[in-house]
Image (cartoon, grey):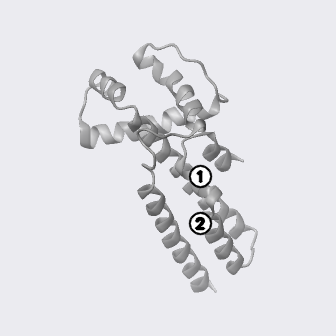
Amino acid sequence: MKTKSLKIKIILTFFLFIFFKFYLDTLGFGLPYFISADETAGIKSLLYFYGFFSYANQNIVEPIYFPLISFLSTGFLILIKNIFIWKYTLPELKDFFFLNPHLLYKFGRISSLIFCTLSLILYFLISYKLKISKIYIFISFLALSCSYLFFDIANVYGKNALLLFFF
């Protein structure tokens, strides 16, 4: 019984990796010129927290939890990329994003993808704890991860990925 459970976990981990890799490859869709309307509201709220570095006055459009968590996640991703690849100082990094705003959208989309992946893991753990049939968990996991709605949530930077993860 334990080997069957281990096989299901390995298969679902493999599909989770495929899901993440596929959506990561399609993440640059439309950038830098075409963005979703939900992304503009999200970026405006995110710039409220980044305004600390640029002294720009912005208003929060979304609920407070989304820009704060988004600021922390995109800031962490930018910090990691800056430490290992870019190696800019803080003023240079500010000017770099001023000249390349599509990168902030891309990091926001990566954070949305991470939250969607975490919600899939949470869905699996809840279904597994409820002792639902393994076949049902597997089929519903694949159906959810391949649905067009999930594609839209994972590839668009907005509050929907966080809402999916939290609620």
From this viewpoint, is residue 67 visible?
no
Residue identified by numbered label 1: 152
Helix, strand or loop status at disc 1: helix
Q: Position of residue 72 (x, y in %)?
A: 49, 34
| Pick the front one: 21 or 135 | 21
Residue 87 in percent (x, y) is at 23, 35
At 55% from the left and 32% from the top, the residue drawn is 40
For residue 97, what is the image quadrant?
top left
- The residue type indicated by label 1 comes to Asp
Residue 38 in which image quadrant: top right
Q: CA distance from mark 2 to mark 1?
A: 11 Å
Label 2 element class: helix
Residue 141 lies, with reference to residue 115, above or below; the image says below
Give the side of residue 60 with respect to residue 22, left or right.
right
Q: Is residue 150 left or right of residue 100?
A: right
Query: Left of 51 or right of it: where is 129?
Result: right
Sequence-first disc among 2 and 1: 2
Residue identified by numbered label 2: 146
Q: Nearer the viewer, residue 117 or 155?
A: 155
Pick whichever, 12 or 99, lies toward us.
99
For residue 90, say whether it is visible: yes
Residue at point 55%, 37% (across, down): 39
CA neighbours of label 1 inside 10 A, class few (<14), some (14 to 19), many (20+):
few
Q: Amino acid at mark 2?
A: Cys
Residue 69: percent from the left, percent from the top? 56, 35
* Residue drawn at (53%, 21%) of the image: 48
- Figure check: 31 above or below 25: above
